[in-house]
C-alpha cells in the first residue's frame, strides 16, 4: 500500500512542485471530450467537469500559497497571468475561425459565428446561448463553431470572482476558504436541483451559478486543513482509494447518456465532481500510486499540456471538416490529427512565447496590448459583413 505524502510547507516563492499526474488528468479530460464530440463515448462530456475540478484545485492552491508566502494576493498580477495564459490562444482561434467561416462557411454558420464572437470575447457566451433558448444536447451540430466555449466562459467568470473571495476570507486561513467553497458548492447544487427542467436541463448544465460546485469542490480539497484530514483518512489505502475513484469516474463516462441520465442533474454531477476533486488531490499527495504513475505517462502528459488549445480548436475543426468525411472513424482520425496539430502550433508558437518570454506582455505595455487586442476583436465582429437572413413571402405560398 502507498502512504499519502504529508503536506509540505510553502516556500518563500509560494510555488509548488510540478505534478505530472495532473497533466495526465488534463489529457484524460480532453480525450473524453474529443471522443464525445466524435460520437464514441456517451459520457465523455464529463471531461469538462474534470477540467473544472482541476482548475478549481490549481487556482485555489496557487492563491493560498501566495497568501502563505506574502500575506496577501495581488489580484492585478493574478488576472494578468490569466490573461497571458488564456487570451492569446483564444484570440488566434476567434480570428482564424471567423475568417475561415466567413470565407467558406454556409450563411447560417457565418451569422452565428459573428453573433457569438463578441460574447466569447466577453467571456459571457454561456449566458448568451442560454438567452437564445437553444438546447445544449440538440445544439451541437453544424451551425455554430464557438458553442463549446461556454465552459471557458464559466471558468473565466470563476477566475474573476473567486480570487476576491479568497482574499476576503484569507484572515481565517485555509479553513475559511474550505468552508466558503463547500457552502457555495451546496448552494450551487441546490440551485441545480431546483432549476433543472426534465425536458431540457441546458439551463443548469451551462449556467455559471449551477455549475460552480464543479470548480469549488476542487477548491475545497486545495485547502490545507482538508488535505490533512484526507491524508489521515486515507492513510495506507491511498493506492486502493485512488484506483476506486478512477474506476468509478471511468465507468460513469461509459454509462451516462446526457439528457437521458436525469440523475446527473439531481446530484450525479455533484458526486462526479467530488470524486474528481478527491482523485486530483490524492494524485497530488500520493504520486507513487499506480493510478498516478499511469497518468504521468509521457504521451498523456503531453496531451494534457496542449489540452487548452486542443479544446479551443477541436469543435471548429469538427464543424468545418466533419461534413466532408462520411466514415465515422476516418472523421475521428482526421479531426484528432488536425486538432492536435493546430493545438501544438498554438502552444509552441503562441501560448508559451507570450506566457514565458514576451516582456511586452507585462506591465503597462501588456495592458496596452490587451486593450488593443480587445478593440481589434470588437472591430472584427462589426467589419465582417454577415449574409442577409433568408425570408419567405408567405403570401406567395399555396
Image (cartoon, helix red, strand yellow):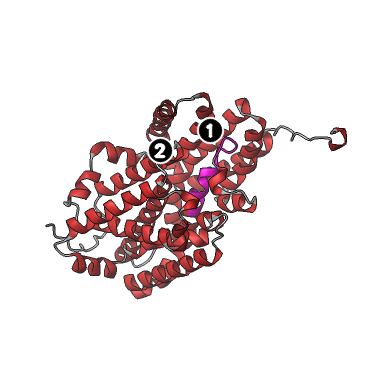
Q: Quadrant of the N terminus?
A: bottom left
Element marked by disc 2: loop
Q: Earlier in the sequence, mark 2 or mark 1?
A: 2
Q: Who is closer to the viewer here, 360 or 110? A: 110
Residue bounds of the magenta highlight: 141-154
Q: Is residue 92 magenta?
A: no
Which residue is at a point 38% across and 54% down the rendered structure image?
Answer: 55
Q: Which residue is mark 2?
A: 40
Where does the image place residue 360, in percent across and percent down from the top left? 45, 41
Residue 352's image quarter?
top left
Q: CA–CA distance between discs 2 and 1?
A: 17 Å
Q: Who is closer to the viewer here, 104 or 272? A: 272
Which residue is at a point 29% across and 63% down the rendered structure image?
Answer: 69
For residue 319, the mark is: 1
Residue 152 in the image: above or below residue 303: below
Evaluate whether residue 371 shows in this view: no
Amino acid at each position: 500500500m502507498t502512504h499519502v505524502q504529508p503536506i509540505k510547507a510553502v516556500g518563500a516563492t509560494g510555488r509548488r512542485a510540478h505534478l505530472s499526474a495532473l497533466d495526465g488528468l488534463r489529457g484524460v479530460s480532453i480525450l473524453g471530450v474529443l471522443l464525445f464530440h466524435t460520437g464514441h463515448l456517451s459520457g465523455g462530456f464529463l471531461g469538462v467537469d474534470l477540467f473544472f475540478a482541476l482548475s478549481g484545485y490549481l487556482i485555489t492552491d496557487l492563491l493560498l500559497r501566495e497568501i502563505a508566502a506574502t500575506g496577501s494576493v495581488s489580484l492585478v498580477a493574478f488576472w494578468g497571468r490569466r490573461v497571458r495564459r488564456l487570451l492569446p490562444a483564444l484570440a488566434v482561434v476567434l480570428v482564424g475561425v471567423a475568417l475561415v467561416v466567413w470565407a467558406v462557411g454556409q450563411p447560417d454558420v457565418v451569422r452565428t459565428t459573428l453573433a457569438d464572437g463578441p460574447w466569447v470575447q466577453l467571456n459571457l457566451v454561456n449566458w448568451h446561448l442560454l438567452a437564445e433558448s437553444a438546447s445544449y444536447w440538440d445544439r451541437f451540430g453544424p451551425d455554430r463553431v464557438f458553442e463549446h466555449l461556454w465552459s471557458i466562459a464559466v471558468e473565466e467568470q470563476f477566475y474573476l470572482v473567486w480570487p476576491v473571495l479568497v482574499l476576503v476570507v484569507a484572515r481565517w486561513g485555509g479553513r475559511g476558504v474550505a468552508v466558503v467553497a463547500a457552502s457555495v458548492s451546496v448552494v450551487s447544487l441546490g440551485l441545480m436541483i431546483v432549476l433543472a427542467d426534465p425536458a431540457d436541463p441546458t439551463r443548469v448544465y451551462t449556467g455559471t451559478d449551477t455549475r460552480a460546485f464543479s470548480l469549488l469542490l476542487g477548491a475545497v480539497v486545495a485547502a490545507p486543513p482538508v488535505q490533512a484530514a484526507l491524508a489521515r483518512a486515507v492513510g495506507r489505502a491511498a493506492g486502493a482509494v485512488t484506483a476506486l475513484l478512477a474506476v468509478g469516474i471511468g465507468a460513469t463516462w461509459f454509462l451516462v447518456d446526457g439528457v437521458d441520465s436525469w440523475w446527473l442533474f439531481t446530484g450525479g454531477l455533484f458526486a462526479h465532481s467530488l470524486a474528481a476533486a478527491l482523485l486530483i488531490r490524492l494524485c497530488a499527495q500520493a504520486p507513487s500510486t499506480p493510478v498516478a504513475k499511469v497518468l504521468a505517462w509521457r504521451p498523456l502528459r503531453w496531451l494534457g499540456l496542449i489540452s487548452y488549445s486542443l479544446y479551443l480548436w477541436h469543435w471548429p475543426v469538427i464543424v468545418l471538416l466533419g461534413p466532408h468525411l462520411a466514415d465515422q472513424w476516418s472523421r475521428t482520425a482526421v479531426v484528432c490529427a488536425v486538432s492536435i496539430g493546430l493545438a501544438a502550433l498554438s502552444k509552441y508558437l503562441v501560448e508559451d512565447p507570450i506566457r514565458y518570454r514576451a516582456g511586452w506582455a507585462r506591465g503597462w505595455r501588456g495592458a496596452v496590448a490587451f486593450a488593443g487586442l480587445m478593440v481589434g476583436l470588437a472591430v472584427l465582429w462589426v467589419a465582417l459583413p454577415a449574409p442577409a437572413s433568408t425570408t419567405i413571402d408567405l403570401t406567395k405560398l399555396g
